[in-house]
Amino acid sequence: MSFMSKFLLAALLFALSATAQPKPAAAPEPTRTLDKAKMEAYVRHLLLWGPHITVTVANPVAGPMPGYSEVKVTGGYKTISLDEIFYVSNDGKKIVRGTVYDIDSNPFSSEIEKLKTDLSPSIGTPGARVVVVVFSDFQCGYCREEAKMLRENLLKTYPSDVRLYFKDFPIEQIHPWAKPAAIAGRCVFRENPAAFWEYHDWIFDKQTEITAENLKSKLSEWVKAKGLDAVQFSRCYDNKSTEKEVNATIEQARVLRVTSTPSMFVNGRPLPGAVPWEQLKAIIDWEIDYSKKTGAAGEKCCELTLPVPGAAPAKK
């Protein structure tokens, strides 16, 4: 046999032996199976959610990291509901509770995506480097003080770098006229967007004088004094025409895991509780500097919690 024939035969045998080798087994697909009863029992014990709290364990979905599925667990009590996100290993034996970050993305990209600011009352420069979104309650005392702080300082200090959006988050369980006031505010906004901020300042200023019983009469007086269409406002308010809009912001707050008022987001960064101006200014300055470099454009009030053993009562 010639050298060339031997070479070709050897090459053929090598090729046949290579193709005969078994291929590596494919990585197993996540089972997405979960013992929901066991998960519920574990979360109840972890979070002190007793039998008076209803617990719903959602089906697992693809998680943000390999080997883990994302599971949403919702606790409910009367009209309150709170979501907790867990990451469960594919074998169902390990649970991670926390936030998963992608180092190649803004750490607050998830919050930014969930914050819907369209058709929301706003002031400031469109397209500003810093967007501040505040979830507030017209009957909350700390919200009144924060609103005053924002109105006095924000645009005066940052005439072109900041845009402020207002979101309603009335906590009805402890504030009986907060939601009707939110509905009224949206009625004003529908008729005259600029007048909303006059309403915002007025209702916070008169907060201690307003009750559930006299709210409508005081609203009528204010509407008349401002020269707004009283008939149109009354029809909107009495028919609760803007309640769906208020409910939408409440749901948005729930998705963002807002549990207290006031709560702010600065370029997606959550800031729960009343934030002093000096601290807020430092954060805004940081975000402005971050935006220039990358091109990317304290005390709580009225906390919304599920009743668990040892928990302090909600603040008024």
Image (tube, rainbow, N blue to C red):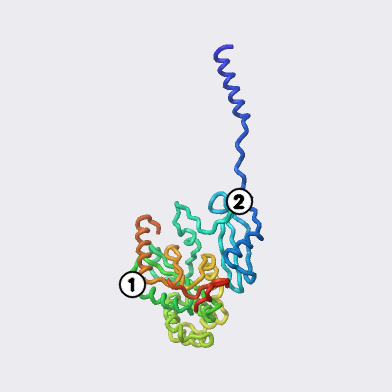
Q: Is residue 151 above or below residue 14?
A: below
For residue 266, side relative to residue 184 (left or right): left
Q: Residue at x 52, y 59 (%)?
A: 98
Which amino acid is tagged 2?
Asn
For mark 2, does the 10 Å Cα neighbourhood hold few (<14), some (14 to 19), or many (20 or more) residues? many
Q: Is residue 183 left or right of residue 282?
A: right
Name the mark on residue 156: 1
Quadrant location of the N terminus? Answer: top right
Tell me residue 2's x, y (percent).
56, 12
Q: Quadrant of residue 3?
A: top right
Return the x and y of residue 143 as percentages of the image width and height.
45, 76
Please state which of residues 220 and 129 is positioned toward the viewer in this rendering.
129
Tell me which numbered mark, 1 or 2, is placed earlier along the sequence.
2
Q: Residue at x 54, y 59 (%)?
A: 97
Q: Could one spot residue 245 in this view of the protein?
A: no
Going by the picture, which residue comes out furthest to the left?
A: 157
On screen, 94 above or below 134? above
Q: In the image, is residue 52 above or below residue 42?
A: below
- 99 and 135: which one is in front? 99
Tell me the number on the disc at residue 90: 2
Q: Quadrant of residue 282?
A: bottom left
Tell me the number on the disc at residue 11.
none
Name the amino acid type tagged 1: Lys
- The residue located at (59%, 19%) in the rendering is 9
Local SS, label 1: helix
* Nearer to the camera, 122 or 315: 315
Residue 10, horizontal then vertical, whole percent: 58, 20
Viewer-nearest residue: 214 or 239: 214
Residue 42 seen in this snapshot: yes
Label 1 – label 2 distance at C-alpha:
53 Å
Compared to residue 142, the image places residue 67 above or below, namely above
Element marked by disc 2: loop
